[in-house]
Image: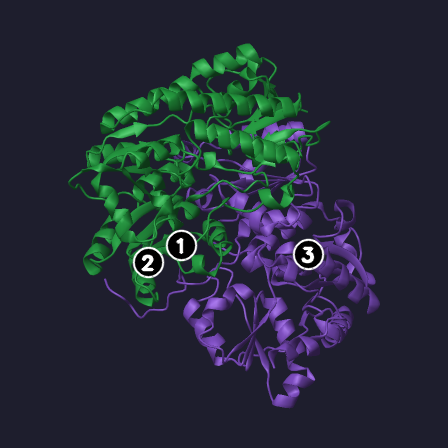
Chain colours: A purple, B green
Amino acid sequence: MGVQSMRDWHTHVYTSTYTADVSGVCSAMYELGGMTVLHDPSGCNSTYTTHDEPRWYDSKSLMFVSGLDELTAVYGDDSVLINDVKKAAEDLKPRFITLCGASIPHIIAFDYRGTARLIEKETGIPVLPVATDGLKSYVSGVDLALREWIRRFADETEEPVKNCINLLGVTPIDFSGPANVKAMKKTFEDLGFTVNGCFAMEDSFENLTHAYRASVNVAVSSAGLKTARYMKARKNIPYVVGLPVGKYMAGRMADAILQAQEDGRNRTAFDERTEGDILVIGEEVYAKSMAEAVSRTGFAAGRGLAAAALWPDTDEGLDEDDLYDRVNRSQIVICDPLFFNVFADEKTKMIELPHEGYSGRIFRDRIPVFASGEFDAEAFIERGK
Amino acid sequence: MNTPYQLIRDMPYRYNADIGLAYSSPCRGVWNIVHYGTLVPQGHQIFVCPTSCLRGVVLTTAEMGREAMKKLSTITVGEDNILNGDMEEQLLHGTEKIINTLHERPRMVMIFTSCIHHFMAVNYQRVYRILRKEYPDIDFIDCYMDPIMRRTAPPDPSLRRQVLRVLKPAEHDSHRVSFVGNCYPMTEYCDLYVHLKRNGIEVSDLTTMKKYDEFKLMEQSCLNFTFNNAAAMAGRDLSIRLKQPEMKMRPTYFYDDIDADMQNASETLQIPDVSDEEKARLRKETEEAALRLREKLNGVPVSVDYTAVVRPLEFAVYLLEHGFNVESVLIDVITESEEVFRKLVEIKPDLKVYSSLGWNMRTADRTHEGKILAVGQKSAYFNNTNYFVNVVENAGMYGYRGILHLLGLMEEAFDSEKNMPVLIQEKGWGCRV
């Protein structure tokens, strides 16, 4: 064995890591009145509550870790978890329980569905099994949790209402505090749509049960894609992928939603660009939408520049070598400030746009309202002069 | 709904809150293994874990700033590693890549494997053997971030031992001792430090070191002092491997115990004991300070937690015996002797004991009628008070000077409010790179 030249997405000499699927589950379920149980020894819970959850201090939502230990794992003794959840649930009386877990339950083949069924039988409280493994990014966790919630609680007898949309994949991990969510809702309402449900921030359990009233689902982040596909499969509700980053993208979104409503086909509201002098790093739908918005600015057009997106793979995150190459080939990079150490020199200009999914709470105060038709992409990219 | 506390008279001596679903409060001052690892001068930490585990250590480091980020790298365990069974190769390849990419060559590389490595029976020692041959100028240390093993080998005490594993048997210097397993420098508020310096004894303490060579001098110490339970594994290991005797300095608030431990240390080092005059003076000053503070508090309740002082029940006894109104303590395990516990039951049977870990603490009523003085972040948070002593793990305090300083901090906290929500959420109180 020696130094190999093989591609190695695993090793990160300098860079941070995107948050994991378990945080995604907790974040997605946070405001819905349930109790989320993370089956894990310890650590994932405090990571989530410290770095990924801006609502933790000021609210009393229920999220706990099971405290799995060596003997319980070796014996595969699920009764420990079942009894512990029962005890807490009997006291706290959550509306529902979500059961997710990290890598050890995964490798010992913990039966999420079976255990959920047993807890539900004994407590009478609905239990959602979300089989995360701690190996994937939050995108997977948010999506699995939202899909499971809709599968369980959404009323499938409801019929779509024209110009009624759901926003899928909305959590603080991508959108931080409520300002972005409120602005995003307002943008769609200003475009003539009714926001039927926002999964799952700034909304309620009761309202979200009417999910199937939407005529189109909008996956405003990649964390809403599985859910969108699920609803397409169940009730043939088409979906649009994109985020209204500024006026141009808001217009593209409106057109795509109306077309999807008309012909029932899924759409993306941005063009796919693989290369560009401007690079946007972040969650896939945000990054592609921002790249589209930036490419359409006078700043970019006047200089003959185009913007491309770079996003973390759900399984592998960002390959640090690839990241280094892409960043240092670009003139301008729009990214989280925690990527500072990828920049080889000052030839490449960084425009900061912090992302909680990457840097957690560190730059929370500097996150702008970007998910809005009123976001000024022109002024934003001009910082790269 | 369950009451979130028990009265001490209703509790068994054997108590451990790490049972059942656990809650993570917003209090973040206690150090984790990343903080401790950053103490090693010219050291580099490599965490090898799934994403869910990496997230916490990376952002803990990032919150310490850009310099800290230069001292940490990661190797993500992926599904492919599990399926291919190539954890050893990945570990080796990743470590090589990191070392060959770093701008500065580290003197020590701490490689943290995780729970999954135990369960996959990864032979990491084989990898370390190869690395030691490839990079003979670097000390490689096997470290563990494996909370699944916390009942038998908790990661934090394990790390305090592991970083010292590079020390080799050496000739002992009768004028050098080590303070082992602390997070904070023990200097002016530590009776032992003051006494040793006065008698010409050099103290090696990882918390104050700037260069790796200073760290290696610990090999020459003739005696190791430990001040808390988290250092016990380290102290024992050094006594076996390097034949350096360990002396446990009890982090006590009982004057006779302080005197006894100091005398024991002096005798072992063959230096004069603290003079009777000095002991009497320190004892008098401490008593006077306690009395002054009691009068100032004038019955205002006090709450103590285990994050601030490593013997919270003993400190509660001390305060109660000095007339303070101790209302509650927050502990997740009892670390004091049964004698101390029984004493507390006797003098304050209605003392409220909270577990900070319990799931029912999430919905606990955090309001407190009237002013309360908290010693520690968790006491402050759960009593929702801005009047609190913001320290962690005794913060370098030991002996009379330590008690005097702590009483001073309590007085200061009583007089002026702090921004509790902001301060308690800062990770790793006082840890800087």
Whether pointer 1 and pointer 2 mark residues with C-beta atoms closer than 8 Å, the reply is yes
Of badges 1 and 3, the one in the foreground is: 1
- Residue A29 can be seen in this image: yes
How far separated are the C-alphas under marks 3 and 2? 42 Å
Residue at numbered disc 1:
B77
The residue carrying mark 3 is A234
Residue B311 is situated, as x and y percent measured from the top left of the image, at 46, 26
Under circle 2, the secondary element is: helix
Q: Residues within 10 Å of mark 1 (few under 14, many from 20)?
A: many
- Residue A351 placement: quadrant: bottom right
Please give the label number shown on residue B66: none
Q: Nearer the viewer, residue B65 or B358?
A: B65
Q: Are marks 1 and 3 in contact (CB under 8 Å)?
A: no
Sequence-first disc among 1 and 2: 1
| Residue B359 visible in the shown view | no
Chain under disc 2: B
Res A194 quadrant in image = bottom right
**B56 over B156 or under it: above or below:** below
Q: Is residue B264 left or right of residue A255?
A: left
Q: Residue furthest front?
A: B277
Outermost residue on the left side: it is B171
Q: Are marks 1 and 3 on the same chain?
A: no
Mark 1 and mark 2, same subunit?
Answer: yes
The mark found on residue B90 in the picture is: 2
Q: Is B71 placed left or right of B387 in the picture?
A: left
